[in-house]
Image (tube, rainbow, N blue to C red):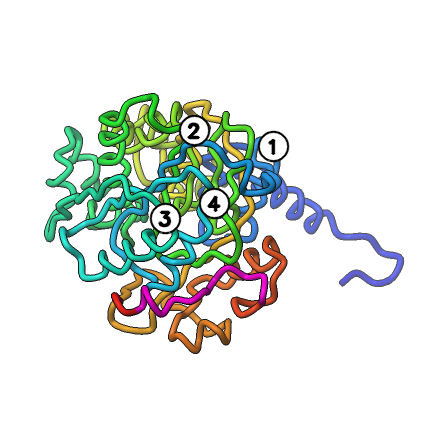
Amino acid sequence: MPAPGQGLSRGAVATAVVGVFLVCIQLGDPGRHFAWCSGRRDRCDQKFDSPPYTVATRAGSRSRQLDRTLYVPIGRLRGGVEAWCSFARTLPRNSSVALFLGDPNPPDERAFKACLDKYNVPLLTTWYSGEPKESWAEFLDFDRKDWFKNDRLPAAQYLGKISPDHEGTGGILLAYRYLLQKKVREIGPHKFDRLVLTRSDFMYMCPQELPLPNDRIYIVHGEAYGGVTDRHTVFPWGMADVGLNVTSWLAHATDVELTRQCPKGWGRLLWRCRHLWLNGQWATRKFYNLEQLLAYYFEMMGLPVQFMPRVQFLVRRDSAKDSSTWSQGENLDAALNNRRILVKYPEEYAEALQTCGVSNCAAPQASCFDDTSAAAKNK
């Protein structure tokens, strides 16, 4: 520290200026922002808190929710009967459900349907992906599977279970978007007003109120990891086809579309951006996980996006029934603990509490539980 009355040395000032300059380089471009904030969730979320990624207000009473809405939980049935009944109990009026599962006849399908029946929620259909046991890349049969296996680029996450150098299950979630796009086209343009792509392991603390107007994509706030969360998305039906086309776009995208140029000079060395020599310059990925890919794709396609308030949080049954790639869950809510249900992401839980104005799942005004004894018999 300089003595009182003395200024900083020229070297210290120069170092500070260079540091600020390099950070600005990284933040000046969406792709560079994604690379800089990878693993820094608190900083990453800030970029998308400004327009058009503002948070919508809650729409009002459920009696006003007249849009014909199709909810599609994808993947495996997880979370348990309490979560499934909270989903059915809090759906807006005029909602239908279509399950999109992996293997036919999963053991919990009967219990999930019992919750829908209990609250008179129509089940449109149940689709089965025929989830492969070995290779999702071969299952999808994309023309450019060679790019998925490209080992010149650094390891990432968005092609998990498709590319061997990618972690997680992002590739499976992209596969379901590819398959769901086909189903949406089969249904046609006039049967529904909205499509909600979601998961089965959400616990809902209060009613799901669809934001207005129905002219943009709404994504639940939080858990963005440098982009936008993939866990709960509300599409206007007219935007669903292009919104779900991200998988096909990715499969046929060129190296130029998928990579960004590295900063020149010391910036490239500092950020270790030296992965792919492309068109006479070093390049690297534009996105590292599914959240960043979705944000980049929506922006590139000119799709308007807005955050919606969170009323749900992911849970996991404290048993072998619910596997988890990332979070194993925590004991955060006494009422959930009594039912051996764990909260997977504390930030989701805290935001749902704030949105719904409740203190926990046992609060009188909370929607987590009701008389689940009838449905529990089918668990």
Q: CA–CA distance between discs 3 and 2?
A: 24 Å
Q: Is residue 55 visible?
A: no
Which of pointers 4 and 1 lies earlier in the amino acid sequence? 1
Residue 134 lies, in percent from the top left, at: 10, 51
The Cα–Cα distance between marks 1 and 2, rounded to whole angstroms, is: 19 Å
For the residues labelled 1 and 3, the Cα–Cα distance comes to 38 Å
Measured Cα–Cα span from mark 2 to mark 4? 24 Å
Comparing marks 4 and 1, which lies closer to the viewer? 1
Query: What's under tag 4, amino acid-wise?
Result: Gly
Q: Could you tell me the amino acid type at mark 3?
A: Asn
- Left or right: where does residue 141 sit relative to residue 234? left
Q: Position of residue 362 (x, y in %)?
A: 53, 70
Question: What residue did someone put label 4 on?
Answer: 226
Sequence-wise, the earlier of marks 3 and 4 is 3
The answer to which of marks 1 and 2 sits earlier in the sequence is 1
Image quarter in which the N terminus is found: bottom right
The magenta segment: 364-376
Is the stretch drawn in magenta largely helix, strand or loop? loop
Check if mark 1's residue and mark 2's residue have beta carbons within 8 Å.
Answer: no
Would you name the residue on which mark 2 appears?
A: 236
Which residue corresponds to mark 1?
51
From the viewer's perspective, tell me whether residue 44 is left or right of residue 239.
right
- Label 4: which secondary element: loop
Is-magenta flag for residue 368? yes
Looking at the image, is mark 2 or mark 4 earlier in the sequence? Answer: 4
Residue at disc 1, secondary structure: loop
Residue that mark 3 sits on: 120
